Image (tube, grey):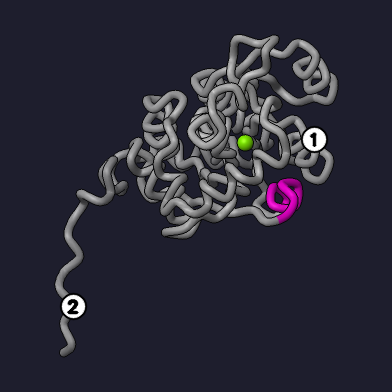
Amino acid sequence: MLRIGFDLDGVVADFRTAFLDAAAKLLGQQAIQRPSSPMPDFDAVSAADAKRVWQVITAMPNWWVGLAPYEPAQIARLYQLARRYRWEVSFLTSRIPTAGDSVQFQSQAWLETYGYYMPAVVTVPGSRGEIANALRLDLIIDDQLLNCLEVVGASQTKAILILRMGDAGLEQQATDRGIGVVHRLDEVIEVLLQLQDILPSKRGSVLRLADWFFKREPDAHVLPMNPRAARPIPPHSDK
Ligand SMILES: [Mg+2]
């Protein structure tokens, strides 16, 4: 079964828009827009201004829970496929803590809202390469070329770079280093399905043999799609 690491911001959650909204509210629209560009832009925000925006954001309880998803249907689809194919999915994030709940819990609550039940969220204080190696991930999906480079440089893990806004230069750099490039989450899922298909041959003959001898009974012993609806925990007895 596949072991997959998903970055959150820029991959499933639209951090960019939420940050720029907070910046516009604090500093005014002109602070997030360069005169030359019709679009709000991260790079238009000076380092000093960004620091002020972060002060506001980190003081807001559970700010991360309010982010919009890029492709909400794909989050639920990823969950359903992970259940079907028994993928081990970890969501990796280096989010900055805010007031309210921990980053881990905010992220878990957010993912459940969009249909990914009981998500494993790992907050990564250090290098993505180390964590990819330690978790023996087959694949990571990230929106930062640097994170992808770190992972392929430090582990056997493959990387997919998600570039939501086309950038031919970045795309070339990534491709030259053996990093796959996509533009949307639904494309990532198509790649995962292809990997799922070729996995037995990729992992060698032992797995193929096991597949041949042990017929799977896919639906007999699994919990419902929403495990929270499965069965109430019986009241605790002290006897
Ligand atoms: Mg990211």
At x 76%, y 10%, the residue is 168
Left or right: 84 in relation to 237: right
Mark 1 surroundings: few (<14), some (14-19) or many (≥20) residues within 10 A: some
Please check the rendered image and state whether residue 63 is part of the magenta-colored stretch, yes or no: no
- Circles 2 and 1, Cβ within 8 Å, touching? The answer is no
Front in this rendered view, residue 41 or 120: 41
Image quadrant for the C terminus? Answer: bottom left
Decide if ligand 1 comes within 8 Å of the CB at mark 1.
no
Report how far apart the C-alphas of labels 2 and 1 lie in the structure. 50 Å
**Residue 186 percent coordinates (x, y):** 49, 20
At x 72%, y 55%, the residue is 126
**Residue 140 percent coordinates (x, y):** 64, 37
Q: In the displayed structure, would residue 233 be above or below residue 128?
A: below
What residue is disc 1 on?
149
Decide if ligand 1 comes within 8 Å of the CB at mark 2.
no
Front in this rendered view, residue 176 or 80: 176
**In the picture, residue 145 is in which quadrant?**
top right
Please check the rendered image and state whether residue 128 is part of the magenta-colored stretch, yes or no: yes
